Image (cartoon, helix red, strand yellow):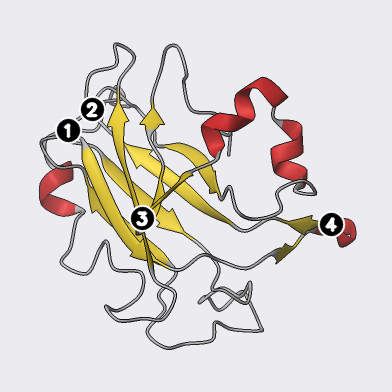
Amino acid sequence: MSTPSQTVGPYLSIGLPWADGPEVVPEGTPGAVWITGTVTDGAGELVPDALVETWQADPEGRFDHPDDPRGATGNGFRGFGRCPTAPSGEYRIRTVVPGELPGSGGAVEAPHLDVSVLARGLLHRVVTRIYFPDRDNSRDPVLAMVPEERRSTLIATKTEDGYRFDVRLQGEGETVFFDV
C-alpha cells in the first residue's frame, strides 16, 4: 500500500538549509556576484518558506563534479548553492557568472545557472534556468525552445552588485519551468 503524495512540509526549513548554503564561492572571490530575488505564488504573494537551489559551471564552463573529466578550476568554487527565502520571500546567493558549456552536436549553451525551487504547495521541485542579460544567449539551444514572448522570465536583470532573478510560481508572468 502506498502513501499519498504530500506537499513540501514544515521540515523543509529544518532539514535542508546549511550555513554555507548560499556561498557558491568564498567571500573576496574575484568576479563574485550576488544573485538575488524573490519567490512569489500565483496570487503574487511572497513565499516566505521556499528554498532556492542553484547548480552551475565555473567561469571556464567546468563543473565541480566527477562526471566532468575537465574538473572545476578550484579556488573554493563549489558549483552548488542553497538558500531558503526570508520572511520577505527574498533569497541571496553569492557566486560567479559561469562560462559557456559544450552542448550536444557541437552546440554551445550560453552561461546559465540551473535552478530548483521547493515550496509549500508543490509536490515536486520546479526547475528553471537563469540566463544573463550581458552575455550572448542567441545560440543557446534550450532558450531557443522557449517561446520568444516567455524568454524574459529566464533572463536576470543587472544590479549594482550582481543580478536579480525573481521566480513567479504561477499566474501572469509565471517563470518558465522545465520538465526534467
Q: Nearer the viewer, mark 4 or mark 1?
A: 4
7 vs 113, left or right, is left
Task: Kindly indicate the quadrant of the structure image that contains residue 100.
Answer: bottom right
| Image coordinates for residue 151, horizontal then vertical, percent | 63, 31
Of mark 3 and mark 2, the one earlier in the sequence is 2
Q: CA distance from mark 3 to mark 2?
A: 31 Å
Please identify the quadrant where the N terminus is shown: top left
Real-space CA distance between mark 4 and mark 1, rounded to the nearest whole angstrom: 40 Å
Callout in the foreground (3, 4): 3
Q: Earlier in the sequence, mark 3 or mark 4?
A: 4
> Closer to us: mark 3 or mark 2?
3
Report the front residue among 175 and 149: 149
Q: Residue 121, which numbered label?
A: none
Q: Which residue is mark 1?
A: 9
Q: Which residue is mark 4?
A: 107
Question: Would you name the residue on which mark 3 appears?
Answer: 160
Q: From this view, report whether residue 144 is shown above or below residue 59.
A: above
